[in-house]
Amino acid sequence: MAEAFLNAQAGGAIVAYSAGLERGNLNPVVVRAMKELGIDISGSRSKHVDDLDIASRDYDYVVTVCDEARAEQCPIYPTQGERLHWSFPDPSSFTGSEEVRLEKTREVRDAIRQRVDEWLRHVR
């Protein structure tokens, strides 16, 4: 979600890439929550921090978005860039009905969007 918001809101001035510690598929609840805001991430793919297209780049900023409860699992990414940590619950950990998981995901989505907005005002 952070990658999609940054790329949508930065107008090309900043290009964001995201990757995780586990390979997998996009969370369909996250895809649905983002689509509600007009951002279609359904064509995106889940990337791993060791994937060549991620690992071969130098970054000005590395932002980890791990939940504080799982912070010890956040990657330490080798780069000269500034490191930031934004703690958000992981939507893949949400339980309950699809509507319950969607509502919790919306809360995370909106918090991420607000954090991206604040950060972009700071770096511009």
Image (cartoon, rainbow, N blue to C red):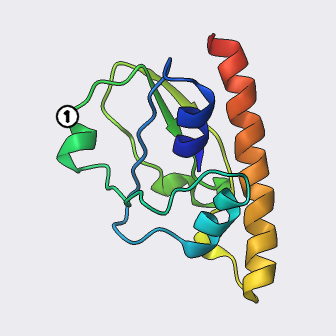
Dot 1 surroundings within 10 Å: few (below 14), some, or many (20 or more)? Answer: few
Q: Residue, x 69% and y 63% (percent of image)?
A: 33
On the picture, is 37 further left or further right than 3?
right
- Viewer-closest of 13 and 60: 13
Helix, strand, or loop for circle 1? loop
Q: Residue shown at 72%/53% (left/top)?
A: 109
Total numbered labels = 1
Residue at the (55%, 44%) spot, across then down:
4
Q: Is residue 83 above or below residue 88?
A: above
**2 versus 69 height, above or below:** above
- x, y (%) of residue 62? 46, 31
In-image side of 91 versus 81 (left or right): right
Quarter holding the C terminus is: top right
Q: Position of residue 110 (x, y in %)?
A: 78, 49
Residue wearing tag 1: 56
- 20 up-or-down from 7: above or below: below
Q: Is residue 5 left or right of residue 107?
A: left
Q: Is residue 14 left or right of residue 57?
A: right
**Residue situated furthest front in the rendering:** 38
Q: Position of residue 27 (x, y in %)?
A: 53, 71
On the image, which quarter does residue 46 sit in?
A: bottom left
Q: Residue 21: percent from the left, percent from the top?
A: 38, 58
Most extreme residue toward the top is 124
Along the line of sight, which residue is nearer the eye, 122 or 32?
32
- Which amino acid lies under the numbered mark 1 shown in the image of this protein? Ser
Residue nearest the observer in this picture, 38 or 15: 38
Residue at the (37%, 60%) spot, across then down: 45
